[in-house]
């Protein structure tokens, strides 16, 4: 057993996240005992090159084969670079890159070998966070809610609040901080709301060679096609009760719904679909939250934020307004979860993934000399 795993008290953990937007690797330090956040440390970002993004895009939806092997090599190499140079770190939380997610069929696939990273970094690495949850009947996603609960306590929220992450896929966590722990029934409800940035990015990459809609400039110049929006909202996923989760490509037909539209109208419509799916999801909240705190790349899109403000019945804020870092929240989440795994604490529960009982996922790999 590594010294980090055996150590009690506050650990200094370094988390890494590479999301479905395929932009790069976020890394961040959290000081925590796995239950409370004591402080946040330095962070960093390592972008994927256009060639690396191409390799990852080619592997999306694949479960095995040459594309998956190539993607794993890209992910591991990028993470070694991104995670190097951080001092006084006890352990690393490594999410890996999700290529495919079908929890009630094939399972879930995040590529990247934590044992390889442990040797390269000379640090214990906690990884493969989702498999145990899926094996026990859970969705395997989202996994950040236990960290969101700790964040709500950290910012001293007095009542229910929502964390909305708009990455490639949107997901929401309803937190009631009046409970003492995230495992308590009623403390958390979490689920994927629907597609977020992924279809917008894919459309702009294909049509205009753009990685994303910077500042919502393309969407702002277009008009929403309400017929396409209504067809999108008729999808059975939105009537399913949470917990529930999505693969990045589950709504690939969205592109077909806007295929006949010009670039601006297509982008505006996809942006409206993201906002509308969040509004649909908010109907599942047990109580109206005091605010929705938006994190992830979508919060930088003023058109999307305006659509959310119009469609939701509570204040919509970028998460920086409460003193948290919206670019690093998911990396911080996997630092926090790594410590929970090291301490033998649960990382998901029925309210977050639909798993049958609280489960602590994750594999711990240590350098051979430890």
Image (cartoon, rainbow, N blue to C red):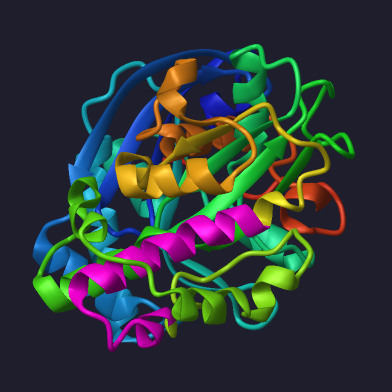
Residue at (31% x, 42% y) in the render: 302
Residue at (60% x, 19% y) in the render: 7
Residue at (37% x, 88% y) in the render: 256
Check the image and report above or below for 99 versus 10.
below
Span shown in magenta: 254-280
Dominant secondary structure, magenta: helix
| Residue 369 is at least partly visible in this image | no
Position of 160 compared to 73: left or right?
right
Q: Quadrant of the C terminus?
A: top left
Q: Where is residue 351 in the image (x, y as percent from the top left)?
A: 80, 49
Position of 210 compared to 161: left or right?
left
Q: Quadrant of residue 103?
A: bottom right
Position of 229 compared to 86: left or right?
right
Closer-to-camera residue (57/260): 260
Q: Position of residue 209 (x, y in %)?
A: 10, 70
Position of 240 compared to 210: left or right?
right
- The verdict on residue 258 being magenta is yes
Closer-to-camera residue (261/194): 261
Residue at (42% x, 81% y) in the render: 252
Check the image and report above or below for 5 versus 49.
above
Check the image and report above or below for 35 versus 56.
above
């Amino acid at each position: 057993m590594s010294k980090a795993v055996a150590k009690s008290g506050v650990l200094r953990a370094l988390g890494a996240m590479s999301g479905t937007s395929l932009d790069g690797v976020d890394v961040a330090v959290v000081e925590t005992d796995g239950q409370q956040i004591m402080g946040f440390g330095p962070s960093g970002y390592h972008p994927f090159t256009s060639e690396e993004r191409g390799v990852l895009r080619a592997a999306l939806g694949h479960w095995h084969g040459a594309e998956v092997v190539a993607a794993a090599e890209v992910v591991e190499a990028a993470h070694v670079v991104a995670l190097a140079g951080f001092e006084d770190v006890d352990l690393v939380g490594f999410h890996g890159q999700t290529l495919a997610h079908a929890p009630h069929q094939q399972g879930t696939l995040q590529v990247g070998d934590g044992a390889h990273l442990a040797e390269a970094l000379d640090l214990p690495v906690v990884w493969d966070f989702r498999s145990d949850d899926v094996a026990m009947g859970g969705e395997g996603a989202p996994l950040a809610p236990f960290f969101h609960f700790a964040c709500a306590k950290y910012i001293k929220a007095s009542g229910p609040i929502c964390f909305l992450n708009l990455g490639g896929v949107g997901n929401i966590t309803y937190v009631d901080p009046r409970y003492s722990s995230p495992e308590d029934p009623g403390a958390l409800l979490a689920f994927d709301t629907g597609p977020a940035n992924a279809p917008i990015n894919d459309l702009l990459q294909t049509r205009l060679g753009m990685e994303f809609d910077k500042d919502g400039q393309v969407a702002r110049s277009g008009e929403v096609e309400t017929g396409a929006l209504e067809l999108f909202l008729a999808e059975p996923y939105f009537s399913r009760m949470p917990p529930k989760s999505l693969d990045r490509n589950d709504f690939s037909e969205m592109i077909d719904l806007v295929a006949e539209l010009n670039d601006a109208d297509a982008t505006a419509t996809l942006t409206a679909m993201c906002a509308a799916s969040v509004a649909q999801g908010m109907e599942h909240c047990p109580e109206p939250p005091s605010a929705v705190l938006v994190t992830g790349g979508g919060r930088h899109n003023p058109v999307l934020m305006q659509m959310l403000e119009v469609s939701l019945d509570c204040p919509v804020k970028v998460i920086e307004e409460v003193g948290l870092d919206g670019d690093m929240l998911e990396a911080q989440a996997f630092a926090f979860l790594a410590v929970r795994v090291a301490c033998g604490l649960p990382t998901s529960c029925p309210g977050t993934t639909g798993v049958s009982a609280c489960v602590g996922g994750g594999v711990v790999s240590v350098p051979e000399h430890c």
